[in-house]
């Protein structure tokens, strides 16, 4: 059996749209020690591809982090595959807030050095000494009180479209930047009650242990993250303290929690919470764009990118060569280009130069 996909993504996306059955979007993670992560990865690929499961799963020696789309008719069989492995016993599964079944179009399972790229030396602190896990209702009322420090442990493009009321939302692009930023930002408030939250809880596991190691005495984290909070708050008929949209790392890029739009189009400033990647392949910047600007800019982040996207193949190749000479390679070009674009968006709503 082939243990990877070889079908073109355009074909896979078309097949997904034509499916006549429904899917469930779920996520789960667990820290545990794996002696043979590649072997484990291959076993899971066999199990889940047979059930037509899609998703993005990361495996490391320290555990698993999974976001998946499972056919409803195969869901019980999927749960049975989990029961084959003792490490999955009683693992909490979180369900999508809004689920159209179109979250993933293929199955990707990768072995990585770490589940979350945090840049930390895990041997330098006790990663198991995590913060207090708070249920959704308790977390809800602690946030509502306004008496404690609430910290969003996600990246700025996630918190931009949705966050808890009164939360500190650091302007960072990666969790690696976030974890030290929060430590330094709150250095003089180590005796205060800290309330951490993220999408599903995995980033808070590492962040809470790191903060405790650095002397924070009352570190707490939302158990199950925003996903579980949204589900339970709805069941309890409570007004959500999370406003806006929850960013998700799949084809949907977001799911509304309370129906509010709290962000703006990066190009014209109109209310907008729809993320997309710039259609210029050399840019591919993730940004917010309203339907009107999507038409004006042809789904690109700037007029420059629109021109490059619509250029002839010969002109595109010339542009790639120019960029290569200037920046050394396409990856470095993209990094420099995205940084410049991010700075532009951070200082203005332009693009309409």
Image: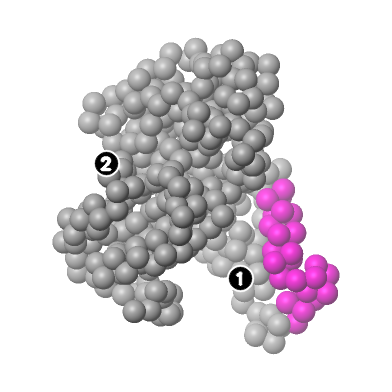
- Against 336, residue 298 (above or below) is below
- Name the residue at the right extreme: 326
* Pick the front one: 35 or 340: 35
What colour scheme governs how the chains and residues are painted in the rendered image of this protein? Answer: one colour
- Label 1 vs label 2, nearer the camera: 2
For residue 170, what is the image quadrant? top right
- Against 119, residue 305 (above or below) is below
Pinpoint residue 353: horizontal percent, then vertical percent: 72, 57
How many numbered discs sit on the rendered protein? 2
Q: Give the range drawn in magenta.
A: 318-344
Residue carrying label 1: 281
Q: Is there a contact, CB below 8 Å, between mark 1 and mark 2?
A: no
* Pick the front one: 352 or 133: 133
* Separation (CA) of disc 1 from disc 2: 42 Å
- Disc on the earlier residue, 1 or 2: 2
Residue 152 appears in the rendering: no
Q: In this view, does 4 lie to the left or right of 94?
A: right
Identify which residue is drawn at 61% across, 77% down: 310
* Pick the front one: 93 or 64: 64
Residue 188 appears in the rendering: yes
Pinpoint residue 44: horizontal percent, then vertical percent: 34, 63
Identify which residue is drawn at 62% across, 39% down: 123
- Name the residue at the bottom extreme: 314
For residue 120, what is the image quadrant? top right
Residue carrying label 2: 90
| SS for dot 1 | loop
Identify which residue is drawn at 72% across, 48% down: 343
By secondary structure, the bulk of the magenta-drawn segment is best described as helix
Identify which residue is drawn at 48% across, 26% down: 131
Pinpoint residue 114: horizontal percent, then vertical percent: 54, 51
Mark 2, other Cα within 10 Å: few <14 / some 14–19 / many ≥20? few
| SS for dot 2 | loop
């Amino acid at each position: 059996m082939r243990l990877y996909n070889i079908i073109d993504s355009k074909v896979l996306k078309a097949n997904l749209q034509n499916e006549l059955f429904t899917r469930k979007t779920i996520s789960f993670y667990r820290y545990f020690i794996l002696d043979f992560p590649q072997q484990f990865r291959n076993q899971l690929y066999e199990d889940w591809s047979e059930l037509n499961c899609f998703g993005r799963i990361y495996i490391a020696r320290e555990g698993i982090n999974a976001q998946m789309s499972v056919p409803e008719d195969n869901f019980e069989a999927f749960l049975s595959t989990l029961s084959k492995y003792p490490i999955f016993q009683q693992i909490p599964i979180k369900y999508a807030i809004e689920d159209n079944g179109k979250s993933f179009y293929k199955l990707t399972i990768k072995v990585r050095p770490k589940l979350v790229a945090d840049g930390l030396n895990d041997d330098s602190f006790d990663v198991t000494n995590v913060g207090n896990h708070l249920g959704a209702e308790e977390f809800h009322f602690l946030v509502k009180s306004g008496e404690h420090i609430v910290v969003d442990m996600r990246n700025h493009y996630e918190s931009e479209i949705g966050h808890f009321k009164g939360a500190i939302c650091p302007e960072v692009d990666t969790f690696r930047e976030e974890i030290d930023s929060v430590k330094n930002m709150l250095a003089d408030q180590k005796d205060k009650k800290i309330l951490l939250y993220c999408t599903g809880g995995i980033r808070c596991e590492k962040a809470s242990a790191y903060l405790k190691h650095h002397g924070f005495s009352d570190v707490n984290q939302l158990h199950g993250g925003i996903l579980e909070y949204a589900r339970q708050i709805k069941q309890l008929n409570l007004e959500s303290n999370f406003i806006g949209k929850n960013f998700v790392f799949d084809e949907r890029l977001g799911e509304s929690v309370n129906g509010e739009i709290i962000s703006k189009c990066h190009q014209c400033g109109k209310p907008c919470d729809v993320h997309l990647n710039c259609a210029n392949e050399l840019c591919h910047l993730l940004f917010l764009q309203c339907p009107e600007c999507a038409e004006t800019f042809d789904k690109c982040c700037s007029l420059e990118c629109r021109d490059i996207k619509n250029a002839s193949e010969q002109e595109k190749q010339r542009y790639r060569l120019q960029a290569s000479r200037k920046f050394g390679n396409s990856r470095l070009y993209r990094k420099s280009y995205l940084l410049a674009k991010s700075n532009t968006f951070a200082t203005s709503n332009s693009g309409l130069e």
